[in-house]
Image (tube, grey):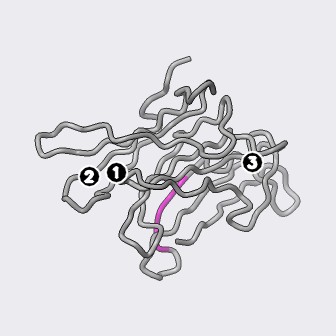
Amino acid sequence: FALRMGTALAAGDGDGDGLFELAIGIPNASVGGDARAGVVANLEGTADRTFVDVGRIHRLSDSGNNDHIGTTTAFGHFQRTDEPYFVGGGPDSDIGVDNDAGVVAQQSTSLGSPRPDLDQVDVGGGNQDNDFFGGALAVGDFDRDGVDDLAIGAPGNDHGGENDAGTVFIAYG
């Protein structure tokens, strides 16, 4: 299988040096023994227009085959600290017995301690088969509190009695 590097891209100045870091989704990358678990590669920009590889984001909990972390990526300041985060969606991730429920992996741009993976339970929903949580990501300060929030698409989520109606969840910063 091809790596599909560049499936998703996100950029931001994570360390405040005026040079942007770049997150590159590689959803078919293997992690450990898990085929196509997926990663988000973090590259730091330099003044001479090159990039330095500074690490990878992958699923922290129960990584498995075909999670496809890196199908989507985003960048934001999701906490009141100045520490920005890159996130990577893995819409095909299994959670327990729920196949393709989906997760969002999180990592600070300094690659310090990662934050726990997000799933639908973390944003007021419930994990179900084929919800594909993390299938789309967008960043904005939706509640105007000065901290970025993360909109997370779950295009296969059943909603209002309709199968696969889709839902957008907000993880408030």
Task: Identify the element where label 2 is drawn.
Answer: loop
* Mark 2 / mark 1, whichever is N-terminal: 1
In this rendering, would 59 be left or right of 20?
right
- Residue farthest toward the bottom in the current orientation of the protein: 145
Residue count near mark 3 (Cα–Cα under 10 Å), binned few <14, some 14–19, many ≥20: many
Q: Which residues are magenta?
A: 137-141
Is 146 magenta? The answer is no
Q: Nearer the viewer, residue 163 or 114?
A: 114
- Residue farthest toward the front in the current orientation of the protein: 113
x then y, percent, for residue 51:
24, 38
Residue type for callout 3: Asp
Write the residue at 68% across / 38% down: 92
Q: Which mark is residue 131?
A: 3
* Mark 3 / mark 2, whichever is N-terminal: 2
Q: Which mark is residue 20?
A: 2
In this rendering, would 31 be left or right of 24?
right
Task: Identify the element where label 3 is drawn.
Answer: loop
Write the residue at 43% across / 56% down: 108
